[in-house]
Image: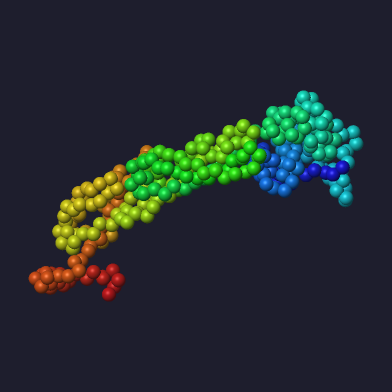
């Protein structure tokens, strides 16, 4: 009799937690389920995975199996149970026939005395396969939004592909389109979860979920930092020097802002709460940039010359020690 290493079958360590074991089983069960899998020998692999999980999912049964593993296997891979071995974990008596029990390996049958597979019907592996309920896969999609749509909220159509099965059990791709309401304040990388809109389940199992990841399309004027929205605002030299009230753009419309007297390029003005909405709303940050006219009139050049004479002691490069 060959020894069955159930931990290796599920690809987990001996110290794996029940959550890790369940996660590994569900992943492999989806991969090899006979109704959907195109893998070679999928039915046999599915039975191996199911057998391993049947033993390792229950603490008492797992403890018994861990005791058996201490005896290991012979050099030729064969295994003999310890003298007087008899399972006390209660695999038997589950309402299953001897034929049902034999759908698992000889190792399982002899070590544990039959298969108690709660929730599956009798009648051999065919009945087991037909009544196996499996949740459908989650589907992930991306949705690009304009900044205005992300901040204000909108309604968008999302198209994505799910994998379904036809009447012959073959896996087929199916295009699906939904109209989705996007809540206000969605930021780059955040997800919207639509329960039950993923791939259909097998054997009457529930459908998976759809996860939509938000992407922000580049904006010609605004950039985003966390919940804040930034914009660069050009101002004339005299506006920066003397101070002025100017018009600035925001995502929600135009506003009047006061440029403080003596402002320089890089100075930031903050509009509280004008960024992304939420429990802690972001701000709109206006970064001033002093802009020069491309051409000056003769009179303007004379004024600059006069200004240079009046401010001849000002050294804008003093911090550079030049």
Residue 165 in percent (x, y) is at 61, 40
With respect to residue 315, does 240 lie above or below? above
Q: Quadrant of the C terminus?
A: bottom left
With respect to residue 160, does 287 lie above or below? below
Residue 100 in percent (x, y) is at 79, 31
12 relative to 64 in the view: left or right: left
Seen at 34% across and 54% down, the residue is 219
Seen at 40% across and 42% down, the residue is 156
209 relative to 82 in the view: left or right: left
Residue 70 sits in which quadrant? top right
Residue 142 in percent (x, y) is at 47, 48
Residue 274 in percent (x, y) is at 29, 45
Closer to the camera in the image, 83 or 194: 194
Tally the numbered discs: 0
What's the image's color scheme?
Answer: rainbow
Asked if residue 210 shows in the view, the reply is: yes
């Amino acid at each position: 009799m060959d020894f069955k290493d159930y931990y290796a079958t599920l690809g987990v360590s001996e110290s794996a937690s029940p959550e890790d074991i369940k996660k590994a089983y569900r992943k492999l069960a989806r991969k090899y389920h006979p109704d959907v899998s195109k893998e070679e020998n999928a039915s046999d692999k599915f039975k191996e995975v199911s057998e391993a999980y049947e033993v390792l999912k229950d603490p008492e049964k797992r403890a018994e199996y861990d005791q058996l593993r201490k005896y290991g296997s012979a050099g030729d891979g064969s295994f003999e149970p310890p003298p007087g071995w008899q399972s006390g974990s209660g695999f038997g008596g589950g309402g299953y026939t001897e034929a049902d029990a034999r759908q698992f390996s000889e190792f399982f049958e002899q070590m544990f005395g039959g298969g108690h597979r709660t929730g599956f019907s009798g009648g051999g592996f065919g009945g087991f396969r037909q009544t196996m309920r499996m949740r459908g896969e989650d589907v992930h999609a991306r949705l690009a939004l304009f900044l205005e749509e992300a901040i204000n909220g909108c309604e968008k159509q999302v198209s994505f592909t799910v994998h379904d099965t036809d009447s012959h059990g073959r896996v087929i791709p199916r295009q699906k389109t939904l109209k989705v309401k996007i809540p206000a304040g969605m930021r780059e990388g955040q997800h919207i979860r639509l329960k039950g809109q993923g791939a259909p389940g097998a054997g009457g199992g529930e459908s998976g979920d759809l996860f939509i990841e938000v992407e922000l399309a580049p904006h010609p004027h605004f950039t985003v930092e966390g919940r804040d929205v930034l914009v660069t605002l050009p101002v004339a030299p005299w506006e920066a020097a003397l101070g002025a009230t100017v018009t600035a753009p925001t995502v929600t419309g135009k506003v009047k802002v006061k440029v403080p007297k003596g402002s320089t390029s890089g100075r930031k003005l903050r509009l509280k709460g004008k960024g992304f909405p939420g429990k802690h709303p972001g701000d709109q940050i206006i970064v001033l940039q002093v802009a020069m006219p491309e051409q000056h009139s003769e009179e303007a050049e004379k004024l600059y010359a006069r200004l240079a004479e009046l401010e001849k002691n000002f050294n804008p490069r003093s911090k550079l020690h030049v």
